[in-house]
Image (tube, helix red, strand yellow):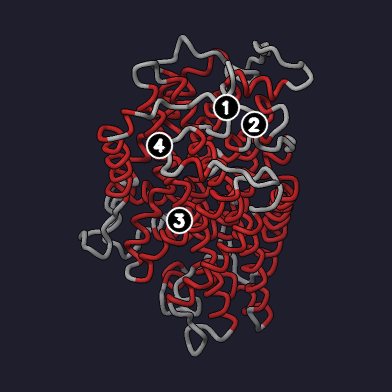
């Protein structure tokens, strides 16, 4: 892996190379640049949050393939996802701006396609981030409901919150995120650092505690080789089941573009931004797999854990932890405490989501791509994009409203979070290995002669995932189980391209320079 330093070609003091590099890219320094490499990494690591991803999507992995699909599938996903992260880190080093993905596409797609590529990439990125924020925080509201249900006696007499109460909990969580993200970046960075501590310590404690408490533990053979085909979804082909099960691992390793969006607030951004991406993905992949194995060690009765009639209402991990402690101590309170640890991690993850949303929204509106851009681009006295922070909170709440009428409708929109965001990741990488293959000028971090092959592996992997996650998840296909992922993703593509053809192509020129020439 080669490393080189590029000289800054602007007439600014050498003492502030970050400001100089940003001006070279076409922007004034407006955000407060106060983040270290650790702080930048912390935001991505807190947003990836394996405690969040693994716990909230464990039902999916357990249903589609079970232990083998999850523990071995995780290693497959982590390997290819690592290629995506390396390719993104290389581009981030060359273009350290808050715009991140859409800015990269504009610079890499070539003169004739730059504006359209930037427009489509940006809208995929920001819509996927908004839906990701909704999915994370709504899953926290659901987990709080399950904790209350188990703490009050389970489905047999316990308090089962209505969908309106769950929505109210969700709204309260979002308001708290809005308040924390209105703080100056120096204070907000402490939450990111706390997130690193909490996720790391939480995984460490749970990995030791859960197997130690369990009276009944699954064998290593079960954990790594048992393949569950009894999913109740009418899917029996093992390859198909495995493909569906990969969604858990892919969703759990998502959101590291946050490091790119925070680069205008990061010192030595053309190096520390890429390091934030690579380090967060590497550690999340390792800790996530260890946590996943520990959870699977107490999975001994898959049909019961997935049964909606169990104490946790079919929430597999909640039921497994509750049962594990109840069998050992005659009380499930220990399991509820473990779920509380996860809930705090999800809360921090949700806050990091809003942070990433706001920085992406700030950059996109700076270039005039959002309706009323002049309003969303404003900073408050603490140099925080206050207006777009609360826009992100509002839109996340609106996205969850369909859950009142149909859980399927809600899932249709949040499906964009995984597939849509990875499409946004892949687009600039695709341009890097095609139109910009010879013109790309690397930053301090680059992959050298491996750049081209790693890039094509990344693009191919995302293309494969997009197809796999668009397949039916149950047979026969009905309105109740229809997979709306292709509809949602296709809708974003159709609307963004349609808006471009009808309106945006007449005025959107991609990233707009806001410094004097």
* Residue occupying image coordinates x 48% and y 88%: 156
Q: Are marks 1 and 4 in contact (CB under 8 Å)?
A: no
Q: Quadrant of residue 9?
A: top right
For disc 4, the neighbor class at 10 Å (few under 14, some 14 to 19, many from 20) is many
Sequence-wise first label, 1 or 4: 1
* Residue occupying image coordinates x 23% and y 59%: 475
In which quadrant of the rendered image does the N terminus lie? Answer: top right
Question: Which label belongs to residue 395?
Answer: 3
Sequence-wise first label, 4 or 2: 2
Q: Position of residue 348 (x, y in %)?
A: 64, 56
- As displayed, is residue 61 above or below residue 357? below
Q: Are marks 4 and 2 in contact (CB under 8 Å)?
A: no
Q: Position of residue 168 (x, y in %)?
A: 50, 73
Measured in 3D between alpha carbons, the distance from the residue under mark 4 to the one under mark 2, in whole angstroms, is 21 Å
Q: Which residue is mark 1?
A: 92
Measured in 3D between alpha carbons, the distance from the residue under mark 2 to the one under mark 3, in whole angstroms, is 27 Å
Q: Are marks 3 and 1 in contact (CB under 8 Å)?
A: no
Mark whose residue sits in front, 4 or 3 = 3
Q: Secondary structure at mark 2?
A: helix
Mark whose residue sits in front, 3 or 1 = 3
Question: Which label belongs to residue 273?
Answer: 2
For disc 3, the neighbor class at 10 Å (few under 14, some 14 to 19, many from 20) is some
Question: Which label belongs to residue 423?
Answer: 4
Task: Residue 286: tell me if it is visible.
Answer: no
Q: Are marks 1 and 2 in contact (CB under 8 Å)?
A: yes
Q: Quadrant of residue 263?
A: top right
Measured in 3D between alpha carbons, the distance from the residue under mark 4 to the one under mark 3, in whole angstroms, is 21 Å
In which quadrant of the rendered image does the C terminus lie? Answer: top right
């Amino acid at each position: 892996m080669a490393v080189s330093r590029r000289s800054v070609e602007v007439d600014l003091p050498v003492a502030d190379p970050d400001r100089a590099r940003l001006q070279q890219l076409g922007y004034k320094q407006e955000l407060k640049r106060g983040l270290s490499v650790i702080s930048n990494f912390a935001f991505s690591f807190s947003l990836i949050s394996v405690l969040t991803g693994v716990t909230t999507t464990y039902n999916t992995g357990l249903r589609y393939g079970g232990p083998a699909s999850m523990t071995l599938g995780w290693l497959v996903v982590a390997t290819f996802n690592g290629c995506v992260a390396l390719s993104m880190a290389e581009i981030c080093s060359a273009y350290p701006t808050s715009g991140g993905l859409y800015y990269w596409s504009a610079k890499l797609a070539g003169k004739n396609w730059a504006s359209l590529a930037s427009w489509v990439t940006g809208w995929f990125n920001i819509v996927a981030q908004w839906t990701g924020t909704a999915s994370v925080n709504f899953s926290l509201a659901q987990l709080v409901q399950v904790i209350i249900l188990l703490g009050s006696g389970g489905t047999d007499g316990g308090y089962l919150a209505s969908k309106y109460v769950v929505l109210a909990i969700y709204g309260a969580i979002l308001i708290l995120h809005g308040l924390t993200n209105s703080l100056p970046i120096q204070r907000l960075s402490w939450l990111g650092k706390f997130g690193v501590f909490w996720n790391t310590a939480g995984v460490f404690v749970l990995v030791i505690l859960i197997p130690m408490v369990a009276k009944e533990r699954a064998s290593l053979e079960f954990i790594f080789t048992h393949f569950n085909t009894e999913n109740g979804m009418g899917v029996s082909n093992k390859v198909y089941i495995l493909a569906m099960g990969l969604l858990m691992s892919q969703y759990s390793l998502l959101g590291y573009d946050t490091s790119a969006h925070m680069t205008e607030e990061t010192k030595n951004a053309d190096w520390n931004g890429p390091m934030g991406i690579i380090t967060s993905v590497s550690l999340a992949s390792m800790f996530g797999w260890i946590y996943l194995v520990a959870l699977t060690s107490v999975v001994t009765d898959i049909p019961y854990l997935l049964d909606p009639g169990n104490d946790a209402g079919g929430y597999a991990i909640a039921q497994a932890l509750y049962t594990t402690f109840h069998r050992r101590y005659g009380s499930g309170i220990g399991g509820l405490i473990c779920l509380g640890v996860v809930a705090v991690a999800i809360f921090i993850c949700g806050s990091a989501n809003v942070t990433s949303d706001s920085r992406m929204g700030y950059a996109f509106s700076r270039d005039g791509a959002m309706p009323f851009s002049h309003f969303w681009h404003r900073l408050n006295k603490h140099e925080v994009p206050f207006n777009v922070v609360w826009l992100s909170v509002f839109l996340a709440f609106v996205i969850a409203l369909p859950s009142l009428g149909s859980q399927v409708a809600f899932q249709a929109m949040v499906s964009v979070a995984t597939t849509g965001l990875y499409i946004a990741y892949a687009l600039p990488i695709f341009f890097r290995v095609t139109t910009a293959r010879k013109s790309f000028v690397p930053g301090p971090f680059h992959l050298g002669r491996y750049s081209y092959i790693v890039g094509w592996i990344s693009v191919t992997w995302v293309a494969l995932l997009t197809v796999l996650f668009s397949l039916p998840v149950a047979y026969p296909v009905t309105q109740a189980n229809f997979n709306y992922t292709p509809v949602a993703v296709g809708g974003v593509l159709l609307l963004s391209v349609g808006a471009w053809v009808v309106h945006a192509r007449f005025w959107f020129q991609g990233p707009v320079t806001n410094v004097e020439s």
